[in-house]
Amino acid sequence: MSVNFDLIKSLRESSGVSITECKKALEEANGDLNLAIEVLRKNGTLKASTKTGREVKDGCIGSYVHQTGRIASLVELNCETDFVARTDEFKDLAHTLAVQVSGMNPIYISIEDIPDDVIKKESEIIIDSNDIKSKPKAVIDNILKGKLEKFYEQVCLLEQPFYKDPKVKVKDLINGAIAKIGENIKVSKIVRLEIGN
Protein backbone atom coordinates (compact mmCIF):
# COMPACT_ATOMS: atom_id res chain seq x y z
CA MET A 1 0.00 0.00 0.00
CA SER A 2 1.24 3.48 -0.87
CA VAL A 3 1.06 5.90 2.06
CA ASN A 4 0.40 9.63 1.81
CA PHE A 5 3.49 11.67 2.79
CA ASP A 6 1.38 14.00 4.97
CA LEU A 7 0.34 11.01 7.08
CA ILE A 8 3.98 9.94 7.43
CA LYS A 9 4.93 13.50 8.41
CA SER A 10 2.12 13.66 10.97
CA LEU A 11 3.16 10.35 12.56
CA ARG A 12 6.79 11.46 12.55
CA GLU A 13 5.94 14.71 14.35
CA SER A 14 3.79 13.03 16.98
CA SER A 15 6.07 10.06 17.66
CA GLY A 16 9.61 11.33 17.07
CA VAL A 17 10.34 8.11 15.18
CA SER A 18 12.22 8.09 11.85
CA ILE A 19 10.36 8.60 8.56
CA THR A 20 11.31 5.09 7.42
CA GLU A 21 9.80 3.49 10.54
CA CYS A 22 6.69 5.69 10.29
CA LYS A 23 6.17 4.67 6.66
CA LYS A 24 6.52 0.96 7.52
CA ALA A 25 4.09 1.29 10.43
CA LEU A 26 1.52 3.14 8.32
CA GLU A 27 1.79 0.55 5.54
CA GLU A 28 1.26 -2.23 8.08
CA ALA A 29 -1.72 -0.31 9.52
CA ASN A 30 -3.21 0.39 6.06
CA GLY A 31 -2.92 4.15 6.57
CA ASP A 32 -4.67 4.22 9.98
CA LEU A 33 -2.73 6.67 12.20
CA ASN A 34 -3.90 5.19 15.52
CA LEU A 35 -3.09 1.65 14.41
CA ALA A 36 0.32 2.81 13.19
CA ILE A 37 1.12 4.14 16.68
CA GLU A 38 0.22 0.72 18.08
CA VAL A 39 2.51 -0.93 15.51
CA LEU A 40 5.37 1.36 16.59
CA ARG A 41 4.71 0.50 20.25
CA LYS A 42 4.66 -3.25 19.51
CA ASN A 43 7.93 -3.01 17.59
CA GLY A 44 9.54 -1.14 20.48
CA THR A 45 10.37 1.82 18.23
CA LEU A 46 8.09 4.25 20.05
CA LYS A 47 9.55 3.07 23.34
CA ALA A 48 13.00 4.01 22.04
CA SER A 49 11.94 7.54 21.21
CA THR A 50 10.77 8.14 24.80
CA LYS A 51 14.22 7.26 26.17
CA THR A 52 16.26 9.69 24.05
CA GLY A 53 15.95 12.52 26.58
CA ARG A 54 17.62 10.58 29.38
CA GLU A 55 21.13 11.51 30.51
CA VAL A 56 23.96 9.32 29.20
CA LYS A 57 26.94 9.28 31.53
CA ASP A 58 28.57 5.93 30.82
CA GLY A 59 29.63 4.05 27.69
CA CYS A 60 32.62 2.75 25.78
CA ILE A 61 34.87 3.58 22.87
CA GLY A 62 34.48 1.47 19.75
CA SER A 63 37.49 1.18 17.46
CA TYR A 64 38.30 -0.14 14.03
CA VAL A 65 41.52 -0.35 12.06
CA HIS A 66 41.20 -1.33 8.41
CA GLN A 67 43.19 -4.40 7.36
CA THR A 68 45.52 -2.22 5.27
CA GLY A 69 46.43 -0.27 8.39
CA ARG A 70 45.85 3.00 6.51
CA ILE A 71 42.44 3.93 7.99
CA ALA A 72 41.29 3.82 11.61
CA SER A 73 38.37 5.23 13.55
CA LEU A 74 37.13 5.71 17.09
CA VAL A 75 33.55 6.24 18.26
CA GLU A 76 32.54 7.30 21.77
CA LEU A 77 29.18 5.63 22.38
CA ASN A 78 27.35 6.57 25.58
CA CYS A 79 24.58 4.91 27.55
CA GLU A 80 22.97 5.40 30.96
CA THR A 81 24.68 2.71 33.06
CA ASP A 82 27.99 0.88 33.30
CA PHE A 83 26.03 -2.39 33.30
CA VAL A 84 24.90 -1.79 29.70
CA ALA A 85 28.28 -0.33 28.71
CA ARG A 86 29.95 -3.66 29.62
CA THR A 87 27.61 -5.85 27.56
CA ASP A 88 28.86 -7.48 24.36
CA GLU A 89 25.83 -6.14 22.49
CA PHE A 90 26.71 -2.53 23.36
CA LYS A 91 30.42 -3.01 22.59
CA ASP A 92 29.49 -4.63 19.25
CA LEU A 93 27.34 -1.60 18.39
CA ALA A 94 30.25 0.73 19.19
CA HIS A 95 32.56 -1.35 16.96
CA THR A 96 29.98 -1.45 14.15
CA LEU A 97 29.67 2.34 14.28
CA ALA A 98 33.47 2.66 14.14
CA VAL A 99 33.45 0.51 10.96
CA GLN A 100 30.75 2.82 9.54
CA VAL A 101 32.88 5.89 10.31
CA SER A 102 35.93 4.31 8.64
CA GLY A 103 34.06 3.35 5.50
CA MET A 104 31.66 6.27 5.06
CA ASN A 105 33.81 9.12 6.45
CA PRO A 106 31.14 11.31 8.11
CA ILE A 107 32.24 14.78 9.19
CA TYR A 108 29.46 15.38 11.73
CA ILE A 109 27.42 13.15 14.02
CA SER A 110 24.02 14.75 13.34
CA ILE A 111 22.41 17.51 11.28
CA GLU A 112 22.32 19.69 14.42
CA ASP A 113 26.16 19.58 14.51
CA ILE A 114 26.54 21.18 11.07
CA PRO A 115 27.39 24.89 11.42
CA ASP A 116 24.76 27.23 9.92
CA ASP A 117 27.31 28.77 7.55
CA VAL A 118 28.09 25.32 6.06
CA ILE A 119 24.39 24.66 5.37
CA LYS A 120 24.00 28.18 3.97
CA LYS A 121 27.00 27.73 1.64
CA GLU A 122 25.76 24.31 0.45
CA SER A 123 22.29 25.79 -0.20
CA GLU A 124 23.83 28.64 -2.24
CA ILE A 125 25.84 26.18 -4.34
CA ILE A 126 22.70 24.13 -5.06
CA ILE A 127 20.52 27.16 -5.89
CA ASP A 128 23.21 28.79 -8.07
CA SER A 129 23.72 25.72 -10.27
CA ASN A 130 22.78 26.36 -13.91
CA ASP A 131 20.22 23.55 -14.18
CA ILE A 132 18.17 24.95 -11.25
CA LYS A 133 18.32 28.74 -11.65
CA SER A 134 15.62 28.95 -14.32
CA LYS A 135 13.05 26.81 -12.49
CA PRO A 136 10.05 28.19 -10.53
CA LYS A 137 10.59 28.92 -6.80
CA ALA A 138 8.42 26.00 -5.61
CA VAL A 139 10.43 23.58 -7.75
CA ILE A 140 13.70 25.11 -6.53
CA ASP A 141 12.57 24.66 -2.90
CA ASN A 142 11.79 20.97 -3.51
CA ILE A 143 15.10 20.39 -5.29
CA LEU A 144 16.96 22.21 -2.51
CA LYS A 145 15.28 20.07 0.15
CA GLY A 146 16.11 16.83 -1.69
CA LYS A 147 19.72 17.80 -2.36
CA LEU A 148 20.27 18.93 1.22
CA GLU A 149 18.94 15.55 2.43
CA LYS A 150 21.53 13.86 0.17
CA PHE A 151 24.21 16.18 1.56
CA TYR A 152 23.22 15.24 5.13
CA GLU A 153 23.47 11.54 4.21
CA GLN A 154 27.04 12.11 3.07
CA VAL A 155 28.32 14.20 5.98
CA CYS A 156 26.26 13.11 9.04
CA LEU A 157 26.80 9.72 10.67
CA LEU A 158 23.23 9.39 11.93
CA GLU A 159 21.74 10.20 8.50
CA GLN A 160 23.96 7.76 6.57
CA PRO A 161 22.63 4.48 5.19
CA PHE A 162 23.97 1.64 7.36
CA TYR A 163 26.76 -0.14 5.48
CA LYS A 164 25.32 -3.62 6.15
CA ASP A 165 21.78 -2.65 5.10
CA PRO A 166 21.46 0.58 3.06
CA LYS A 167 17.67 0.63 3.60
CA VAL A 168 18.34 1.38 7.29
CA LYS A 169 19.84 4.66 8.48
CA VAL A 170 22.40 4.66 11.29
CA LYS A 171 19.97 6.54 13.55
CA ASP A 172 17.40 3.75 13.00
CA LEU A 173 20.05 1.17 13.97
CA ILE A 174 20.71 3.10 17.20
CA ASN A 175 16.96 3.51 17.90
CA GLY A 176 16.57 -0.25 17.50
CA ALA A 177 19.33 -0.78 20.07
CA ILE A 178 17.67 1.71 22.44
CA ALA A 179 14.38 -0.18 22.18
CA LYS A 180 16.08 -3.54 22.71
CA ILE A 181 18.46 -2.54 25.51
CA GLY A 182 16.05 -0.17 27.26
CA GLU A 183 18.48 2.70 27.78
CA ASN A 184 19.25 5.89 25.92
CA ILE A 185 22.26 5.54 23.60
CA LYS A 186 24.11 8.45 22.05
CA VAL A 187 27.16 8.89 19.83
CA SER A 188 29.21 11.66 21.46
CA LYS A 189 32.41 11.76 19.40
CA ILE A 190 33.79 10.35 16.17
CA VAL A 191 37.38 10.40 14.93
CA ARG A 192 38.66 9.06 11.62
CA LEU A 193 42.34 8.87 10.68
CA GLU A 194 43.66 8.13 7.20
CA ILE A 195 47.28 8.03 6.12
CA GLY A 196 48.03 11.10 3.96
CA ASN A 197 44.91 13.06 5.02
Image (cartoon, helix red, strand yellow):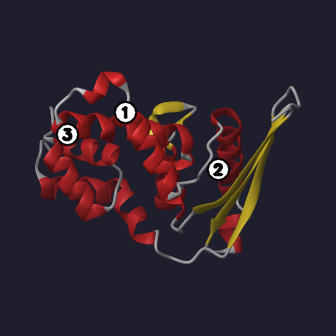
Instruction: Residue 158: give x, y in percent of width and height.
Output: 52, 49
Point out the tag, 2 or 1, that comes first from the N-terminus: 2
Task: Answer few, some or many: residues within 10 Å of disc 1's Cα (few below 14, many 20 plus, some between 14 and 19).
Answer: few
Q: Is residue 189 above or below residue 156?
A: below
Name the residue tied to disc 1.
128
Name the residue tied to disc 3.
27
Q: Considering the numbered disc 2 on the image, is that residue within a helix, a strand or a loop?
A: helix
Q: Is residue 139 above or below residue 6?
A: above
Q: Amino acid at mark 2?
A: Leu
Within the image, what quadrant is residue 100 found in?
top right
Contact flag, marks 2 and 1 (Cβ < 8 Å): no
Identify which residue, 149 or 163, lies in the foreground: 149
* Image quadrant containing the C terminus: top right
Identify which residue, 197 or 2, lies in the foreground: 197
Name the residue tied to disc 2.
93
Residue drawn at (36%, 51%) of the image? 18
Identify which residue, 123 or 134, lies in the foreground: 134
Q: Considering the numbered disc 3 on the image, is that residue within a helix, a strand or a loop?
A: helix
Left or right side of 104 for 86: right
Within the image, what quadrant is residue 55 found in?
bottom right
Within the image, what quadrant is residue 35 found in?
bottom left
Task: Answer few, some or many: residues within 10 Å of disc 2's Cα (few below 14, many 20 plus, some between 14 and 19).
Answer: some
